[in-house]
Amino acid sequence: VDGHTSLKKDWVLSQDAFDALLARLDGDRERAAEQYEHIRRGLITFFECRGSPSAEDHADATINRAARRLIEGQEIHVENPASYFYGIARNVLKEWWDVAARQPAQLDDARHVPVAFDPQRRDDELRQRRIHERRLECLEHCLQELTDDHRQLIAGYYQGETSAKIANRKHLAERLSIPLNALRIRALRIRERLEKCVAACLERGGRR
Amino acid sequence: MTNDPSFDDPRLARYLLGEAPPDEQASIEQRYCADPDFHAEVQAVERELIDQYIRGELTNTAAFETHFMAAPSRREKVEFARALMRTPVSQPAASASGTRRLWPLAAAATLVLAAGSAWLLTNRPSVEPEQANAGVETPAGGGAVPVKPSIAPPTPAPPRPLDPAPRVVTLMLTPTLVRSSGTTPALVVGDATHVRLQLAIEGDTYSNYRVLIRTAEGVEIWRQEQLKAQAVNGERAIVIDVPAARFSTNDFTVTLSGITSGGGVDELDGYSFRAQTRP
């Protein structure tokens, strides 16, 4: 374990290293790229679930570290490469915890905790409200980008509350002749696409 | 935590809320890192949790707020979900008369939000499944087509109505100590979807307030913060909307606290009432 390794991006993933990584994942480059994407998404979930303040950065740090080890001549001896990444991710997380534990708590850390209203945060609230408005606009734009059937699926899937919602989803799955679980995953994929679209739109400052 | 049967595997919700024991946690992580289908399942449960939280259906909000929301990327997902629930998904763009606002309702919603009834708006307006899909089939390879042929030119789809309208039952409460009659106010929830409590206050010296509702046994059923006083019938009051499902037939106490500019909490008034789920 290279415990001294900084979590910062002090080692850049070179093309050679990336190629070596993909080659190790699968002989077919397209399948390797798919596997890489899956591993990265899994790592992001892992870091989110473990409370990382920067899950994507930590996922990338994990991948970089794996790629660096590969290019330095280490081999992945496990049957499933995902397990190898998972092992590294646990180390990255542990290191982050160690670093975080040594640092005094920042006032900003409590920013998202719903505590007392502070008049000095009024500007921040206004800014948040503007972002919220922009998010709504972006979402409307992104919904328009969906195909009709995707838009209908997402509309049907999120209708209703509690028991009505559940009954509605069953009805929708029956109508589409797919199992409920397949419907859930299909709705998830559309939602993920919308999430990405909205994030990209917000990054552009709401410009479409 | 959650009783939603859409969570096929309750371990996933437990894991996402940070409540899984270490061995279960590691087992889930190893599995989703290796299995894309299982990872999708985890992601789907994550979105369900977010939606339930926003709708006020999640009972374990503490775990959600302290653990689940610790990651900024998740907070962004929560904000996205809020937006998704406030933006009704309408018919294709062509029917929207060129406007990006899918429903005029969205603008109205913003106004109502400003008036302080935010909770009601987080509940996605919905239509019955049959109504939503009436006359429309979705062929596998293309867009929606009318089931019955029509010679009439296509007309813009009318905005779908908000349905069913939230049924709100309102109870005005005065602080227990200043109540003159000595009787406990009673509330019949019946088929209401929400209970609106108007808590009379004397003076309005705090920039914001917090309300806690507990059962007679002391179990907290609702907490709301960053509330502002507003005028109700010429008096100052704190107004909250609580999902009716939170109430059983029981006695409830309400504690109102004022939040100082320094973040201190001053307990101000107590209120009590009796709820009956059936008349």
Image (cartoon, coloured by chain):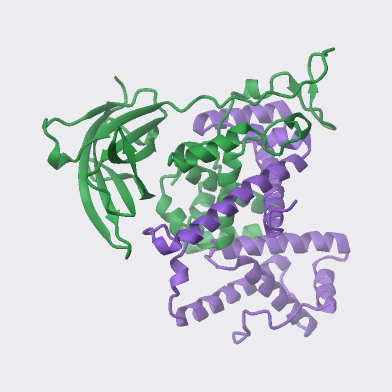
Chain colours: A purple, B green
- Horizontal arrangement in the rendering, residue A158 relative to residue B61 (left or right): right
- Can you say which quadrant of the picture contains the N terminus of chain A? bottom right
Say whether residue B202 is visible.
Answer: yes
Q: Position of residue A195 (x, y in %)?
A: 67, 51
The residue shown at (71%, 26%) is A175
Location of residue B114 in the rendering, given as x and y in whole percent from the top left corner? 47, 43
At x 45%, y 56%, the residue is B65
| x then y, percent, for residue B204 | 27, 49
Q: Residue furthest bottom?
A: A4
The quarter of the picture where residue B240 lies is: top left
Question: Residue A146 at x, y = what percent?
Answer: 76, 41
Q: Nearer the viewer, residue A186 or A128?
A: A128
Q: Residue furthest front?
A: B234
User: Which residue is at a point 73% across and 68% down the rendered structure image?
Assistant: A81
Asked if B106 appears above or below B279 in the picture, the reply is below
How many numbered callouts? 0
Q: Residue lying farthest right? A: A28
Residue at x 75%, y 82% (from the top left corner): A74
Would residue B187 be found to the left or right of residue B138 on screen?
left
Image vertical order of residue B112 relative to residue B147, above or below: below
Q: Is residue A177 visible?
A: no
